[in-house]
Image (cartoon, coloured by chain):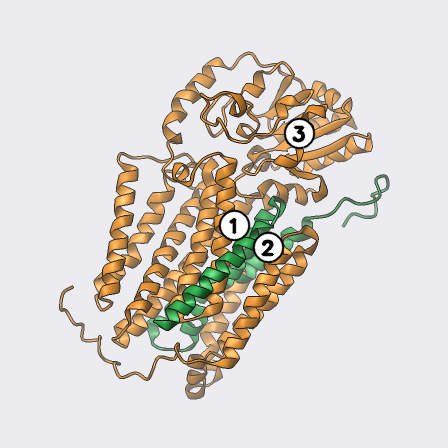
Chain colours: A green, B orange
Amino acid sequence: MLEIFLGLYIFMLAAFVGYGVIKGVPALLHTPLMAFTNAISGISLVGSLVAAGAHYNDVSTVLGAIAVLCATINVVGGFWITDRMLRMFKKQEPKAGADGEAAS
Amino acid sequence: MTGVVEPLLFVAATAPGDADIAFNSPVETLYLIASFLFILGLRGLTAAHTARRGLILAELGMVFAIWGTVIHPDIMAHLEIAGFFQTYKWILLTFFIGSAIGIAISALIPMTRMPERIALSHAFGGLAAALVGVSEYYREQVVAGHMDQTTMAAIGFEVLFGGLTFTGSLMAFGKLSGLIPGRNITWPLQNQSNILMFGGTFVLLVLVTIDPSNQVLFYAVAAMPLLLGILFVAPIGGADMPVVITLLNSYAGLAASATGFALGNNVLIIAGALDGASGFILSVVMSKAMNRSFRNVLFGAFGKVDEEDAAKAAAGGDRVQEASVGDAAMLLSGAGSVIVCPGYGMAVAQAQHVVGELAEILEANGTQVRYAIHPVAGRMPGHMNVLLAEAKIPYTSLMELEEINEDFKHTDVALVVGANDVVNPAAKHNPASSIYGMPVLNADLARSCIVLKRSMRPGFAGIENELFFAPNTVLTFGDAKDTLEKVVEALR
């Protein structure tokens, strides 16, 4: 019982922290934000790793292994694509006329 | 409920004490660092120039979380008995395959298909959570024969949110990618039956919490949300996808959090809560930008109004002024300032790059070019920003609605590329309109307005767009990309 209540406190506080922080994310970055939080919540990887690695029994191991697969796609893919998007966001280049070399 | 006891049930009843409860300080320390880094990383996303640093912090956090997990006491116990290879073979195998798939998808998918990619990843997240839930139930209840009610409740929520997110996101993916018709699929008594089924599932969840040993109940709780996800998303039309995606984002987070409760894992609870909060905020932003409540989107009446108004629109649409490519090019070349209003049509036509080219030419002429991004332009939050950033347009000229809406009246040309309802002035002054009250871009206030449009078909709300008939508006028909390419050629 104590565990659950501690968990609920953690959940509540984390939700408020998340709300406060994410409120400040500009609309400009909302798509990267979704990919980013998606990667983070792929942290259920953690849960599935235990299921896949602890070998409690065959069913748990197989289900856990499939879950690791799904979660890894999210974690690795999510970070990768967030990075790909963020790399595209460029500030105004100071020089207006000559822009031949700056490309790439 | 019934007293059926499976022979399997009590086989391992004397299994050693629950290792989840046991406190392990190295693991917990690593999890604590990971949680800290996740929050710090998210903070980085509050500004474009710190975003990538934030991402790196979060990646580091993930490394700590995974490190903390592979030394989890349950895994270590197995390591001592079975050796390294036996213990980690499944983890390593699936991790490598998963990474390969994840990287392949992420590196190859075009930016225009980002909404599909996000929907698919929610599906994976939901599935992973649901599978871990079933796996835990199987371990503790079916094999070990005992499960306390609090864990059962957590696992119940886990499979509920996980399953709902899984099939719901697959439906969203199907609609976005065109595998399933994007229009709202409706059937009689739809909302009533959906709500009834959701209530029923919840009752089952309560019952299985009271009696965790009832396996039939549990598998029903695990299966019902799969059906519910399909039924909930089926009636929601393509243009409401931004709300659906953000809501599913929130559910995926809640599923991860519930997993944390089931496993007594704090980093999971925190990461899930962050994801849930993010999805929640975004769905509120989306709903506000459409001037509709959650309830209205989920159980929306949009579908019914659609047909009549669409017919009306088709009948009445013949007073528009058409402009040739040459006319459009002339208007643009004479303009001192241009605001581009992109919409989903730009993504469909993949016109973002040519928009960038056009802007380059105009800017070389001394024209000021900016972009007005409506929050629900596109199929997910921030969709247009990513596309325009891909076309190498600096993010400093991408403006949010509130930032730029007052500037339209001092602007020479508003160029509408594949947007419709988000520039419909009826939302401002016509209480009879179904989008009345929705914030819209003031494209009608610019000195002149060029609308690039494929045909006279109405937008998602199925209503007439007054902007098209305004005296200062001209329409250029055709594929947005083709048209813009010709305009660029004419200007060169």
> Residue at position x 47%, y 30% from top?
B460
Rendered location of residue B378, percent (x, y): 55, 38
Whether the residues at callouts 1 and 2 have beta carbons within 8 Å, the answer is: yes
Which chain's residue wears label 3? B
Q: Residues within 10 Å of mark 3 (few under 14, many from 20)?
A: few
Q: Residues within 10 Å of mark 2 (few under 14, many from 20)?
A: many
Above or below — where is B105 with respect to B404? below
Label drawn at residue B406:
3
| Element carrying mark 1 | helix
Rendered location of residue A36, percent (x, y): 56, 56
User: Can residue B485 be seen in this snapshot?
Assistant: no
Above or below — where is B171 with respect to B302? below
Label drawn at residue B37:
none
Which chain's residue wears label 2? A
| Element carrying mark 2 | helix
Task: Report the residue marked by disc 1.
Answer: B117
Q: Is residue B334 left or right of residue B203?
A: right
